[in-house]
Amino acid sequence: MFVPMAFTPVCADEIGTLAELVVEARETGSADVFSRIPEILVVSTDTSATLRAWLHELGVASSVSGCSDFWPHGHAARAYGAFDEDAGTATRKSFLVRPDGSYRLVASARPGEARGRSEHATALHLLAEGL
């Protein structure tokens, strides 16, 4: 899940929603989902220290992992077509990444708008089905 910046309201809401979905899936017995994915990554162009502090402050560090795309700046986001050259930040795009490295876009939104909860719920369902 690419997010533009840590410590911003829309990004925080999106991460909270994703963490809720992960907890719900675990509580409803959807453990097979988590056996297929090593982790859920939140990627931003913030430094690793900033990203780690933000996820800890949000209380989601046990549900998701942060991945800093700070240097070379935006390299990972560019590789996924999720970098806004004008803003210098990642765009709001979520991908499912398969073990072979191939990936699928599952959610996106314009700047300032959140990705829908249903898009990420569908992505978790796809994971349960093996993508």
Image: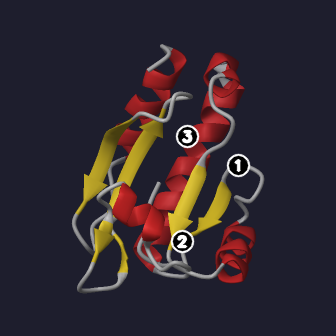
Circle 2 residues within 10 Å: few <14, some 14–19, many ≥20: many
Which residue has dot 1 on it? 63
In this rendering, which labeled residue sits more in front, label 3 or label 1? 1
Q: Which residue is mark 2?
A: 69
How would you rate the neighbour count of disc 3 (Cα within 10 Å): few for under 14, some for 14-19, many for 20 or more?
A: some
Residue 104's x, y, as percent? 35, 36
* Rendered location of residue 80, percent (x, y): 36, 54
Residue under the image location 29 percent in, 86 percent down = 87
- Image vertical order of residue 26 relative to residue 93, above or below: above
The residue lying at 61 percent from left, 23 percent from top is 33
Q: Secondary structure at mark 2?
A: loop
Residue 73: horizontal and vertical position, in percent?
47, 80
Q: CA distance from mark 2 to mark 1?
A: 20 Å
Q: Earlier in the sequence, mark 2 or mark 1?
A: 1
Query: From the viewer's perspective, is the residue at label 2 or at label 3 nearer?
Result: 2
Whole-number angstrom distance, CA of label 2 to CA of label 3: 25 Å
Q: Please name the residue that numbered disc 3 is placed on.
A: 21
In 3D space, how far apart are the residues under numbered discs 3 and 1 (Cα atoms)?
Answer: 10 Å
Residue closer to the observer: 108 or 58: 108
Marker count (numbered) = 3
Q: Amino acid at mark 2?
A: Asp
In-front residue for pair 59/127: 127
Picture coordinates of residue 13 (x, y %)? Answer: 48, 65
